Amino acid sequence: MNLVRAVASHRVLRPVISALGTLLGVAVFVFVMLRAIPGNQITAGLGTEAAALTPAQQAALEAYYGLDKPLVTQFFNWLGNIFTGNLGFSSRAQQSVLELTAQSLPVTLELAVFSIVLALLIGIPLGMLSASRPDSPRDAFGQAVGLMGLSIPSFLLATALLAILSATVRFNPNGQAFAYFSEDPLLNLQQMLLPSLVLGFGIAAPIMRTTRTAVLEVRGQDFIRTARAKGVGPRRLQVRHVLKNALVPIVTMTGLQFGYLLGGAVVVEQIFSLPGIGRQVLLGIQQKEYALVQSTVLLIALAFVVVNLLTDLLYRIIDPRVRAE
Amino acid sequence: MTEISESAPASLAGVQSGQRLRLLLKSRSGVAGLILVGLLAILCVLAAFGLLPYDPLAQAPQQRLLPPSAAHWFGTDQFGRDVFSRVAAGVASSALIAVVAVAFATVVGTLAGVSAGFFRGVSDAVVSGVTNVLFAFPPLLLALSLASVFDRNWFTIAVAIAIVYVPIFIRVTRGPVLSLREIDFVRAAVSSGQRRAAIMFRHVLPNITSILIVQVTLSLSWAVLTEASLSFLGLGTPPPAPSLGSMIYEARTLVYIAPWTMVAPGVIVVLFVVGLNLLGDGLRDSLDPRNRGRK
């Protein structure tokens, strides 16, 4: 019992175990959701021809795909396969889901990193600008940009940018076949530019708002007055004292945006023809490929849970107050 | 799903409903949001009662791609349909989906969140577990997967969006209820032997209304965005029903010769979301006591 209690209150083990429990729930949810779709691998693979199957052929195919077993058995077979790296096979692409994901994941990760960097570069300075003089014109400007970021749908921004740029300056690097960074770094970066700007603008808004609130809150505290009284210069005060202490909510908010990012990736990858993981899900849904959607959604949720866990652990490191609890 | 207003116990002090409106009217963004949302609500009413200048579905091949004019305020599309009427019908349909989705999420999420916070124990563990699982999916991805499971019509889209927003309402209500149940008047009600359901409805719920109002408004703006994204991706209400997202999708190829086909639905969807966000911000500023009196 002591061991159980020790684990339950441990500051690293506790979130890790709760994350594992969540993952199991996620697996059950994904499995049940996709079994609820009308049709199965057989009808998806054969289309209307599935109606012409004899009962014997039907039974043979069901046995082949394991559809004749009880749902619980199917679930654990699926889970067991995932642990051994067998994520299923996409019959359209004639590739395993693992191979497909190995190609698409780097694209989405690259997009995610660029978007977050752009978002931080836009959001933090804008938030500090707003906070530097609340209720002034510059605050209104910062807030207006933030409001636009929250309110303009990414698909609209992407479509409009693409239309305007290709009509005026004929800039449409995404019109050509996708280039991986290892093949053609220059073209790859050009192709990543617009999608990361679109996603980055959307995430910059909540980061801007969080920065503004956090900076205003920190600035009102006693230690800032003390630092100023000690003669700390304004720039050093802003960066070393204010921003550093405002960082916890900003990091938390950035971590939370990862979910928006992966959802937004579906839209943006589709519009800019990036062969990333979001597009993989969308294609899978359109073509009713069970295994593909199931495994990809599970992988995305896994990534999401891990990122949340890391954010949680990260701010325990940044903030001594959380660390001590 | 970008912000969740988790409020500290300080914000639990009740505000009377008449006072709420007065406080809102003092906030500049609240008034701006109220006006925008009000104008769009008028559009919805016109669409609902068939008072639009044209039938949003009626095709008129000889009137294709006409620029905006007195007869067609926002021009016509590739089938000669009136863009203004289609935009109005699109606003009405996304408002309907957003309202139904958020209403469902509010009722289910609040009941679950309040019970979890109030009863603790097993119900709290179950509700929190489900919340964590639903939060593990990126919101748009979850809506997308759910929308692909159902036979698509406006109601199933609303349900798909609602499922995504249930955990937000759970999280937003559970925290304040946890601290409410330790406050004297609730403890007094418990020790005076009132039924627990009565305590929940009479003493707990009224004290989280402000939090809920703010969250409902902000969720409506996300629901409108989600619905538009789904229909842009071809997973929303099936055509020919007008929807802002699918109108923008169809306008992609027309934008060079008939820019109004994209500008009209694009501007309207942004105004819609901006209006709801401003209203939500205004409500938050005026209803949250932590913000009141602060300048």
Image (spheres, rainbow, N blue to C red):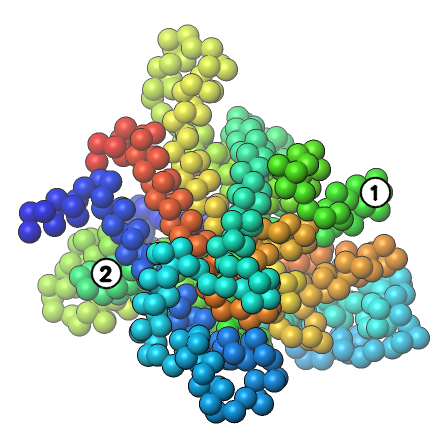
Please name whichever residue, B290 or B150, is drawn nearer the observer in this view of the structure: B150
From the viewer's perspective, is residue B62 above or below residue B3?
below
Residue at x 83% of width, y 60% of height:
B254
Please name whichever residue, A319 or A113, is drawn nearer the observer in this view of the structure: A113
The spot of residue A221 in percent (x, y) is 36, 25
Q: Is residue A286 left or right of residue B120?
A: right
How many labels were placed on the picture? 2
Residue at x 72% of width, y 48% of height:
A177
Residue to which mark 2 is pinned: B125
Are the residues under badges 1 and 2 in a single subunit? no
Residue B224: mark in rendering: none
Give the number of the mark in front: 1 or 2. Answer: 1
SS type, badge 2: helix
Chain of the residue on which disc 1 is drawn: A
Q: Is residue B30 left or right of residue A319?
A: right
Please name whichever residue, A264 or B277, is drawn nearer the observer in this view of the structure: A264
Q: Amino acid at mark 1?
A: Arg
Q: Amino acid at mark 2?
A: Ala
| Dot 2 crowding, Cα within 10 Å, few <14, some 14–19, many 20+ | few
SS type, badge 1: loop
Q: Is residue A235 left or right of residue B208?
A: right
The spot of residue B143 in percent (x, y) is 51, 64
Residue B32, visible in the rendered structure: no
Residue to which mark 1 is pinned: A170
Residue at x 25% of width, y 50% of height:
A17
Farthest residue in the right direction? B62
Residue at x 44% of width, y 45% of height:
A256
